[in-house]
């Protein structure tokens, strides 16, 4: 795991603020590689900007198709054309901080990995001059931050992440609001031309998300970032204590059948999410809990 990654059961505002430093140098390229897209942008952006803005020096993550070869040849260094739409595209980050994310078997919980991912994206997009906002949804509802090109908007979003993260605990009994409801809210906030990342473990919700995602992805670029724990994908053999609603439980995976059931359930969830993305035109990223966008290896699909 990258040394800048956050560990533990909860995040702090200081943790999320420190991540800004990790997006200022070469890590920017690592995040792009992890997302599997140049500049974390999808080449099929509907309504890609045609209003020319300027020519500037090429930066890692720029679309190579926008290189101005005449200027490059004249100045002997790569230069690229910049379009207003590309420089100012609003980005919306939707983060799940509900009870199913309050799980992890390594050095941190899925909720922490999700919070880190959201913060890294926010800092990266702000540095590129995009308007950044988001929706943080937890057990009690959601907090909405309209996309703006201001540090104050990022701080508002980070504080909402910390508040929802710290509201999680092992005794949560009430069900969370459906993720589909939050996506419907995102469609009203981002009617067209937005880049949207939905960060969640998508716990058995693929079928119910389809109508809302179809509407959201019709005029926006949408990527689902699936956070999962290694235990869900490859359960080890043993007996493991768990806590739910204040009750101590024991998960027994000593039998082959028990481990097969867990793996089968995980594979079915991932398969359903991939099929959902294929049918709605969304992109998909599998992100293990003990990994980070800063690691740089590609897991996009």
Image: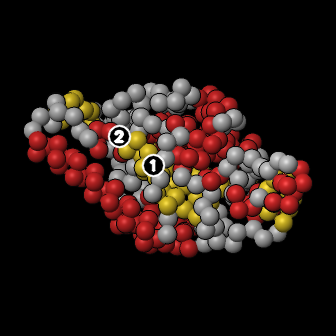
The percent coordinates of residue 233 (x first, y second) are 29, 44
Residue 150 in sight from this viewpoint: yes
Mark sitting on residue 106: none
Q: Does residue 163 show up?
A: no
Residue 225 is situated, as x and y percent measured from the top left of the image, at 47, 52
Return the residue nearer the eye: 143 or 206. Answer: 206
Q: Is residue 100 above or below residue 284?
A: above
Q: Which mark is residue 229?
A: 2
Residue at which label 1 appears: 299
Q: In this view, does 72 lie to the left or right of 14?
A: right
Q: Residues within 10 Å of mark 2 (few under 14, many from 20)?
A: many
Q: How many labels does the image show?
A: 2
Label 1 crowding class (10 Å Cα cut-off): few <14, some 14-19, many 20+?
Answer: some
Residue in the picture at 52% in, 30% down? 2
Q: Is residue 52 left or right of residue 220?
A: right
200 shown above or below 221? above
Q: Tell me whether the residue at label 1 lies in contact with that at label 2, contact meaning CB atoms closer than 8 angstroms.
A: no
Q: Earlier in the sequence, mark 1 or mark 2?
A: 2
Position in image of residue 91 (x %, y %): 65, 56
């Amino acid at each position: 795991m990258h040394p800048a990654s956050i560990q533990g059961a909860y995040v702090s505002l200081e943790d999320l603020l420190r991540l800004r430093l990790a997006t200022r140098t070469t890590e920017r390229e690592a995040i792009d590689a992890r997302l599997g897209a140049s500049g974390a942008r999808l080449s099929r952006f509907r309504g890609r900007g045609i209003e020319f803005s300027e020519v500037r020096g090429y930066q890692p993550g720029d679309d190579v198709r926008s290189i101005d070869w005449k200027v490059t040849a004249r100045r002997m260094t790569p230069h690229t054309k910049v379009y207003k739409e590309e420089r100012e595209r609003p980005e919306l980050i939707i983060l799940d901080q509900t009870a199913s994310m309050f799980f992890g078997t390594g050095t941190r919980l899925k909720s922490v990995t999700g919070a880190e991912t959201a913060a890294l994206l926010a800092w990266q997009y702000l540095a590129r001059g995009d308007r950044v906002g988001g929706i943080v949804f937890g057990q009690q509802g959601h907090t909405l931050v309209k996309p703006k090109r201001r540090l104050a908007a990022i701080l508002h979003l980070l504080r909402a992440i910390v508040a929802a993260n710290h509201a999680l605990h092992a005794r949560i009994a009430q069900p969370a609001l459906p993720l589909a409801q939050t996506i419907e809210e995102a469609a009203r906030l981002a009617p067209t031309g937005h880049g949207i990342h939905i960060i969640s473990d998508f716990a058995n919700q693929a079928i119910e998300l389809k109508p809302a995602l179809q509407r959201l992805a019709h005029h926006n670029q949408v990527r689902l970032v699936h956070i999962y724990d290694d235990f869900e994908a490859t359960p080890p053999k043993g007996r493991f204590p768990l806590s739910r609603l204040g009750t101590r439980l024991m998960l027994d995976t000593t039998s082959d059948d028990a481990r097969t059931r867990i793996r089968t359930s995980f594979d079915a969830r991932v398969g359903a999410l991939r099929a959902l993305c294929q049918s709605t035109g969304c992109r998909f990223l599998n992100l293990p809990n003990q990994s980070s966008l800063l690691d740089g290896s590609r897991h996009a699909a």
